[in-house]
Amino acid sequence: NRKIKIFTLFVVFVLMLGVFGACKRATKGIVITDNEGKTRVLATNDKGETMTDEAGNLIILVTGLDGKEETQRVAMPDSYVSGKTIETKKYTVVIPKGWEQDTGLGDVKLIHKKTDGEINLVTMDGKTLEYAIDEAEQFMMSIENEGGTVETTAATICEVEAKKYVARAGNGNPITFYIFEKNGTVYSFYTAVAEEHKDSVDFEAVINSIVFK
């Protein structure tokens, strides 16, 4: 019995070391969750900044077979979240107060909690601005053919000129599209909200807060 008790205490001690060790390792980096739901710990330098290699791969912290902490390189995911900050390959956006992240068809989707208004951020990798505008024009034409309305204007968004479309389909609620090019990449950002809330949500302020790489 005495041997069993000693062995039990030893197991508990080892488990405690593992728990405390894991906690200690986690504090050395920044915990993120990527777009596939995987949780990783990003390694940081002396300034607390995350690190990448020459190819743009993330450097993460893992526990080796010997139980010691070591680094590995993994490909940059489409996006990842750390706290209130969303990082993508092309830009960084901080989730504003009163908003939350949701799943969508683009890179990032944000929902305004009070009004259910939404912002969808779509990166059109490999596409030209002319192509994106042509696609948008065809979509707007289909809305008009179904009895909806479309207003087309020029706008400045994210410090560049954008083609802005405000489309209203059958229900009359506005969907606003911004088609633009920034740092050599084409984007299609769109917002949607019920008509009664269209003047109470500053979508452009959120979009203009995005930091591009």
Image (cartoon, rainbow, N blue to C red):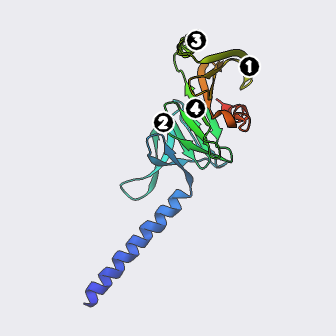
The label shown at residue 95 is: none
Question: What SS does tag 3 mark?
Answer: helix
Hey, what amino acid is under mark 1?
A: Ala
**Residue on which the image places disc 2:** 77
Q: Which amino acid lies under the numbered mark 3 shown in the image of this protein?
A: Glu
Inter-mark Cα distance, 1 to 3? 16 Å
Q: Residue at x 61, y 23 (%)?
A: 168
Q: Give the structural element (helix, strand or loop) at label 2.
A: loop
Q: In this view, does 80 lie above or below 29?
A: above
Mark 4, residues whose alpha carbon is within 10 Å: few (<14), some, or many (≥20)?
many
Q: Mark 3 points at which residue?
A: 137
- Secondary structure at badge 4 equals strand
Disc on res. 120: 4
Residue beneath label 1, please? 155
Residue at position x 49%, y 42% from top?
A: 34
Residue 114: percent from left, percent from top? 65, 46
Instruction: Return the residue nearer the eye: 57 or 117.
Output: 117
Tell me which label, 1 or 3, sits earlier in the chain: 3
Mark 2 or mark 1, whichever is nearer to me: 1
Q: Which of marks 4 and 2 is nearer the N terminus?
A: 2
Task: Name the kind of residue labelled 4 in the image.
Answer: Asn
Q: Which of 130 and 98 is in front in this view?
A: 98
Q: Which amino acid does label 2 sit on?
A: Pro
Circle 1: element type: strand
Q: Earlier in the sequence, mark 1 or mark 4?
A: 4
Could you classify mark 1 by the number of other residues whose Cα lies within 10 Å: few (under 14), some (14-19), or many (20 or more)?
Answer: some
Frontmost of labels 1 and 3 is 3
Q: In the picture, which quadrant includes the C terminus?
A: top right
Left or right side of 23 for 65: left
For the residues labelled 4 and 2, the Cα–Cα distance comes to: 18 Å
**Foreground disc of the pair 2, 3:** 3
Q: Residue at the far left: name it.
A: 1
